[in-house]
Image (cartoon, coloured by chain):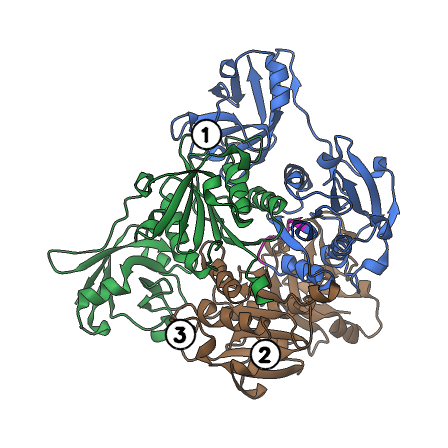
Chain colours: A brown, B green, C blue
């Protein structure tokens, strides 16, 4: 029974469609019309409209938690696609036991940045499109049917022709650096539902920077505010106090215990975060 | 295996319940308690409270993307039901290989307007209700169990007695018309998450009106604003510019490429949209 | 087929994670990686951040609508967990053919208040954790894997050691009382998406209080406003008028027919509601 179970493929959906319209439901209807034996999981549909960068981060921190497999694996459909109907490609990527169906606009930047991509193709085979193909909703007419057919086990190269990895569009992603004054300088890259400020400073980068010094001896600066040390968890400090932790993405976060750091610090995406010994 | 797969019925849910309370989850619990072998798909739960017209449009543009079948087919449950507990009927409609379970308040107006309804009944058989039946949540106590039993294959006439199609409540739906000054006059009927203004002018109506003229020669007017021509896709124009396209519902839409036409045009539902050659 | 069907376990999720981030999707990925044969149902993810009281009420009014069973039954995962990473326990509770996985912070107060809890354990067995265990997201690393393993049929005591029911944290829940002036005094405990004001006065308490008097003879007071009698349903009064009904939770609600009682009465959680004969 276990074996049979493991053959139910998972298709995840990540879009900027919101939850007011029928768009997400319709994509699921198209998928189930092609393959009724899939598990459909929403990652989020509340990516800020047209925010490719935010989508790229979100897919990268989520896909590894889904079942991987060979030849199947989970199929991740990303529809943050301001260029729909234009001449951007639609990609299918195979990597680490997962498939990705996404527009060629940079949303796969973080996924492929470690060089683990195995195969990539441009989805062009109209045989697998839903007809007629609209020029405003490729999620329904191209992405959803491609994912559904993949979940039924067709070879990804049936969907179109292979292209070199170097051909795909990538975002310019700022990395943390060490400044002339010997500070580790990162940036706020995500602000979550709780108002936690997620930075691009990974635990590995932080450890390399502090080189054996104690975590509670560093000072973290955001604008004019200072936080002493990196703590274990939110409740290492009093309720309402600021705290720096390594969050669930293994990235440095600035938080308020049971509060909203976004409001408290008037923080915004892109704001610098400085770590000093 | 394909055969087996196609026997998993789909139940879709469309409500104005929002996503804060337990209402949607509880309906799903009731359904799974009766039939654990269904796929439950949310169309949306963010219909504006009590907005029967918006719900009617949304069900009509979504149901055809779901698996249809005979005798089963998908089951579409619509709970936008301001008259709950009063004397409005609860309907079950069979049409085009789909079933609909909905209050008799007009939410099925667009679905039945082309005269394709096959059978309709008033759900009255208390045997299939969840007891005790509340007077404020028929979605849980009547609609959900009815859909679950339908998905298990009972004949819809077990749920209640057949009624003539002419008996059901219909909304007054304004249609586009040609004015004395030879303009095609439609209206904004939906505004989506992206701020796209969806009109009631279908591609067929538009083609008949312009009678062979080129799409780029028409002028579209919304208030004092003018848009030249109907374009292929959003990115046919510069970012931030207004554009008219036929969207994914085959209806004329006024959009802003990567922007929000609702805000830009200060648009509202019901506003006139005029097309001139 | 029915038998087979009833063996698909249901896992429900109730959190304060919101729907912007990947958190909910990631929990589902973890569960499906351990047991692909589960139905995952969202109760809500829009509990007010860190509002344990609201979560406790919501789980109590929803769980009984899900399939129960022996030895399996539905598994209800509750992640409203401001103390994550601190020293609060993680609980697994068995009751009435259901399982609950929740932090020991009071969210199970209403579930256990009638003394129907059968067994309770503190989840401590690291064998069933996702590693490495973060200090900010136990929903992913402890709750989700525990629920998935339970759904595969492991004995709940494999997850940790049994603890006495008297050990668990409980909220102080105000109950309605009869005042010196012989009024039944309750409070608004929930305000739903429609603006309905849900009180803590159950139908049984109300019946006992009025002791045979007619429902339409009571007067209900909220601030300076008065409502005459308890009606059958919202549409027992004119559109826009105030009405008191027993809602779908068997609790007295103050509503506006097709309107928003929260706005109309400027109501808030905790506000007193008085019933007088």
Left or right of residue B114: residue C157: right
Q: Position of residue C145 (x, y in %)?
A: 76, 57
Q: Position of residue C65 (x, y in %)?
A: 63, 40
Q: How dense is the environment of label 3, judged by Cα within 10 Å: few (below 14), some, or many (20 and up)?
A: some
* Residue B89: quadrant of the picture: top left
Left or right of residue C63: residue B11: left
CA gap, disc 1 and disc 2: 53 Å
The residue at the point 63 percent across, 21 percent down is: C204
Q: How dense is the environment of label 1, judged by Cα within 10 Å: few (below 14), some, or many (20 and up)?
A: many
Same chain shared by disc 3 and disc 2: yes
- Residue C44 image label: none
What residue does disc 3 label? Answer: A85
**Chain of the residue where label 2 is placed in the rendered structure:** A
Q: Position of residue B272 (x, y in %)?
A: 24, 54
The residue at the point 65 percent across, 49 percent down is: C2
Q: Is residue A154 above or below residue B10?
A: below
Can see residue A249? no
* Residue B103: quadrant of the picture: top left
Task: Judge whether residue C58 is colored magenta.
Answer: no
What residue does disc 2 label? Answer: A93
What residue does disc 1 label? Answer: C234
Q: Which residues are magenta?
A: C11-20
Task: Judge whether residue C18 is colored magenta.
Answer: yes
Q: In the rendered view of the protein, which quadrant contains the C terminus of chain C? A: top right
Q: Looking at the image, which is closer to me, C252 or C73? A: C73
The residue at the point 59 percent across, 32 percent down is: C249
Q: Is residue A79 above or below residue C219?
A: below
Say if mark 1 contacts mark 2, CB within 8 Å: no
CA gap, disc 3 and disc 2: 20 Å
The residue at the point 65 percent across, 22 percent down is: C176
């Amino acid at each position: 029974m276990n074996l049979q179970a493991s053959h139910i493929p998972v298709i995840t959906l990540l879009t900027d469609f919101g939850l007011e319209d029928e768009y997400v439901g319709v994509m699921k209807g198209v998928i189930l019309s092609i393959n009724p034996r899939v598990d459909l999981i929403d990652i989020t549909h509340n990516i800020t409209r047209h925010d490719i960068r935010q989508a790229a981060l979100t897919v990268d921190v989520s896909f590894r938690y889904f079942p991987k497999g060979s030849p199947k694996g989970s199929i991740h459909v990303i529809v943050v696609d301001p260029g729909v109907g234009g001449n951007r490609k639609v990609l299918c990527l195979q990597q680490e036991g997962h498939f990705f169906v996404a527009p060629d606009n940079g949303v796969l930047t973080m996924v492929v940045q470690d060089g683990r991509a195995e195969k990539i193709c441009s989805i062009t085979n109209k045989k697998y499109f839903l007809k007629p193909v609209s020029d405003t909703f490729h999620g329904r007419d191209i992405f959803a049917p491609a994912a559904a057919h993949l979940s039924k086990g067709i070879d990804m190269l049936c969907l179109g022709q292979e292209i070199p990895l170097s051909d795909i569009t990538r975002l310019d992603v700022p990395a943390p650096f060490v400044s002339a004054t010997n500070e580790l300088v990162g940036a706020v890259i995500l602000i979550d539902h709780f108002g936690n400020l997620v930075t691009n400073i990974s635990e590995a980068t932080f450890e390399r920077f502090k080189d054996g010094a104690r975590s509670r001896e560093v000072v973290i600066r955001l604008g004019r505010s200072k936080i002493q040390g990196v703590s274990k968890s939110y409740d290492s400090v009093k309720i309402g106090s600021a705290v720096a932790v390594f969050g669930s993405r293994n990235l440095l976060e600035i938080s308020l215990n049971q509060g909203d750091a976004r409001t408290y610090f008037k923080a915004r995406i892109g704001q610098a975060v400085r770590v000093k010994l």
